[in-house]
């Protein structure tokens, strides 16, 4: 294989092995399309990430970004490792709480928090990262109605350029998120909040983008955040207790991608924090990080059965599989690359150029083009890698396709953690009005 990571194995049948189980056997038992998540890989990635920062700073909280994969069992795995949660909706917050994560270890982000969401967050002691002035007023009012003080930070926009897809670059000045730092807007937010009776200003937050494999933007973010922390202390006498750097560390999807190790980011970021704390006489804050993709992406694969092989004279070879853009939207939405192999032929030579299409009636329904694979046949099992993040989480029922099942594997055991949707699931919410009956 071109890209077989350490947690994947092959057996004497030439099949891919995930979590101690033959991928072909998983597909036969649970059907396809099928998401498979390796529990031990999730744990390994969390421990690696946490160690990268806790080895360098004593007070660290790693908050898993549920938007990457909000499956309750996946969140529970991370909760058992000590993770907090980064949420951006009422249901993500409820999932985090149901998974056993205490409110004080949850941060609520996003630019459009509803009254209901803020009530739930305040009631559970969640740290709310306020996005705009109107939201600040709303938080203060809701907290007053509840007879509580809301713990808040402010999401600030440090205007850090990042080499990533425009849709996931979130720290630029033109982004929809946060208070502008350069104009003084962010400082004004802290000034206003300090006069409010129902909020406790404790944090600062930024998130500069996702799928970053370059260390420089993280260092620039740290410089700008800590400079603002120092200014807030000097001008407003507010001590920031939580500095939340967001997420962003990517994974190497392509064979040529170079992995950015968390310890490299930890080394640079903590060095900046220590310098500001020492030079500006700041209190030592808790450092919060919000990884999502890094923790779960390469722990997940998507298994899909080859249905047909189409060859054209002087044209490409197409294979169609039973998972399409409904199950994995990233290739169609972002032009994203996901490595593909045939799980039942991993030891065979990849010498045929093949386009891999899904079953939907759309030209954009493809998972990969011009991929070198073994000669494909009906019944082969395609495996799409690095889909544990933003795979099932972004899936749809387009063309009335049911969403796939998801199983968790661990040292030879497998259990369904999300069942496959049925026809009844597709139509359960539909109603025919009386005049059409």
Image (spheres, rainbow, N blue to C red):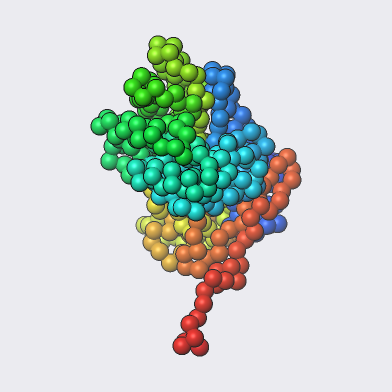
Between 428 and 330, the one lying in front of the other is 428
Q: Is residue 402 above or below residue 278?
A: below
The quadrant where residue 159 appears: top left
The quadrant where residue 275 appears: top left
Answer yes or no: is residue 99 visible: yes
Between 417 and 54, the one lying in front of the other is 54
Q: Is residue 416 above or below residue 251?
A: below
Report the residue at 36% width, 57% height from top.
314
Which residue is the extreme one toward the left? 183
The percent coordinates of residue 298 (x first, y second) are: 55, 39
The percent coordinates of residue 93 (x first, y second) are: 55, 47
Give the left or right position of residue 215, taking residue 40 as reference. Answer: left
Between 197 and 265, the one lying in front of the other is 197
Q: Is residue 180 above or below residue 436?
A: above
In the rendered image, which quarter contains the N terminus? top right
The tally of labels here is: 0
The percent coordinates of residue 221 (x first, y second) are: 38, 27
Report the residue at 53% width, 45% height from top.
147
Q: Is residue 48 above or below residue 124?
A: above
């Amino acid at each position: 294989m071109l890209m077989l990571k350490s947690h994947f194995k092959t057996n004497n049948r030439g099949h891919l092995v995930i979590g101690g189980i033959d991928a072909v056997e998983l597909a036969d038992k649970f059907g396809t399309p099928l998401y498979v998540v390796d529990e031990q890989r999730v744990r390994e990635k969390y421990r690696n990430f946490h160690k990268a920062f806790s080895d360098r700073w004593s007070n660290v909280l790693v908050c898993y970004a549920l938007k990457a994969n909000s499956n309750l069992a996946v969140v529970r795995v991370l909760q058992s490792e000590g993770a907090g949660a980064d949420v951006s909706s009422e249901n993500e917050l409820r999932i985090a709480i149901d998974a056993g994560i205490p409110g004080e270890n949850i941060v609520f982000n996003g630019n459009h928090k509803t009254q209901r969401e803020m009530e739930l967050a305040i009631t559970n002691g969640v740290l709310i990262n306020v996005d705009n002035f109107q939201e600040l007023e709303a938080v203060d009012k809701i907290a007053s109605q509840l007879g509580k003080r809301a713990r808040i930070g402010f999401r600030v926009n440090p205007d850090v350029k990042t080499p990533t897809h425009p849709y996931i670059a979130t720290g630029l000045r033109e982004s929809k998120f946060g208070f502008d730092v350069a104009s003084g807007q962010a400082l004004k937010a802290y000034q206003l909040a300090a006069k409010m009776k129902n909020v406790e200003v404790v944090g600062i937050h930024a998130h500069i983008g996702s799928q970053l494999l370059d260390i420089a933007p993280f260092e620039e973010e740290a410089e700008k955040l800590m400079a603002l922390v120092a200014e807030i202390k000097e001008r407003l006498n507010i001590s920031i207790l939580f500095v939340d750097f967001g997420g962003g560390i990517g994974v190497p999807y392509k064979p040529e991608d170079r992995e950015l190790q968390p310890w490299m980011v930890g080394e640079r970021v903590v060095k900046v924090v220590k310098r500001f704390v020492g030079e500006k006489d700041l209190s030592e804050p808790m450092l919060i990080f919000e990884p999502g993709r890094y923790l779960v992406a390469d722990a997940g694969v998507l298994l899909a059965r080859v249905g047909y092989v189409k060859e054209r004279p002087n044209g490409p070879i197409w294979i169609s599989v039973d998972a399409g853009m409904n199950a994995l939207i990233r290739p169609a939405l972002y032009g994203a690359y996901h490595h593909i192999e045939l799980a039942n032929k991993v030891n065979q030579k990849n010498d045929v150029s093949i386009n891999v299409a899904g079953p939907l009636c759309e030209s954009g329904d493809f998972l990969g083009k011009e991929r070198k694979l073994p000669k494909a046949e009906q019944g082969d099992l395609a495996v799409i890698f690095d889909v544990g993040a933003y795979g099932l989480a972004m899936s749809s029922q387009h063309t009335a396709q049911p969403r796939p099942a998801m199983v968790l594997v661990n040292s030879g055991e497998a259990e369904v953690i999300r069942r496959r949707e049925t026809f009844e699931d597709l139509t359960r919410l539909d109603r025919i009005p009386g005049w059409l009956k």
